[in-house]
Image (spheres, rainbow, N blue to C red):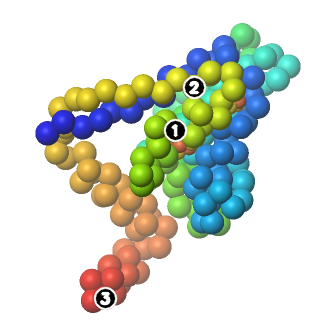
Amino acid sequence: MMRVVKTIKIDVDKCNGCRSCEVICSAFHAADKYGTTNPARARIRVIREPLLDIFVPVFAGDFAPAECAGRNQYIIDGKVHDECAFCRASCPSRDVFKEPDSGLPLKCDMCEDDPPLDEPLCVKWCENDALIYEQREEEAEEAAELEEMEIGLESLVGKHGLQPVIDAIARMSTK
Ligand code: SF4
Ligand code: SF4
């Protein structure tokens, strides 16, 4: 079976740190779609160092149930950035890429919608062409969807505990 692989290339040199991408992402994912904006809910965040002209958009990636044993630290143009600053994971060691109210992990979903959008909204809203959208088809791995569902369940269990999640699923199955 073929699947569509979506990619957003990030041209860091073109980003000016305007944060339009964060605004539209949070609006698209608001409970009342487009009704509110709050960059804390965005699945993209821009690391900003205006005095050094450094702006790096980072997309929210997978949920990580535990902190890494090792850490990364980037030095760009002599500026030493915080540990984990460019990491895409929603993990227990920091507050980024977490839904502010529930604490549930946030992950870029490429603006999935019905009907599908022709391109993700952060790409559309980036006036500087720093975000470039591409898609291609490739052979699908059957395990991928299952793995995604397990990660979602794992995060719910991590937040609420196993029994409340089992109870919720049991309630849903009787509806
Ligand atoms: S592709 Fe969509 S979901 Fe992902 S960061 Fe951009 S606006 Fe947000
Ligand atoms: S909209 Fe484009 S230029 Fe503005 S912060 Fe996002 S990636 Fe950078």
Q: Are marks 2 and 1 in contact (CB under 8 Å)?
A: yes
Q: SS of the residue at dot 3?
A: loop
Q: Amino acid at mark 2?
A: Leu
Which residue bears the numbered disc 3?
175
Residue 91 visible in rendering: no
Q: Residues within 10 Å of mark 2 (few under 14, many from 20)?
A: many
From the viewer's perspective, tell me whether residue 134 is left or right of residue 23.
left
Residue at x-position 27% and y-position 83% = 173
Q: Kindly check if marks 3 and 1 are in contact, taking CB atoms under 8 A apart as contact.
A: no
Amino acid at the residue labelled 1: Pro
Residue under label 2: 131
Instruction: Report the residue at 38% width, 76% height from top.
Output: 165
Q: Earlier in the sequence, mark 2 or mark 3?
A: 2
The disc at residue 120 is 1
Q: Position of residue 34 (x, y in %)?
A: 65, 57
Q: Nearer the viewer, residue 123 or 109?
A: 123
| Residue that lies at the very extreme toward the left in this rendered image | 1
Mark 1, residues whose alpha carbon is within 10 Å: few (<14), some, or many (≥20)? many
Quarter occupied by residue 49:
top right
Task: Report whether the residue tagged 1 is closer than 8 Å to ligand 1.
Answer: yes
| Type of amino acid at the residue the image marks with label 3 | Lys
Q: Nearer the viewer, residue 118 or 76?
A: 118
The C terminus is located in which quarter?
bottom left
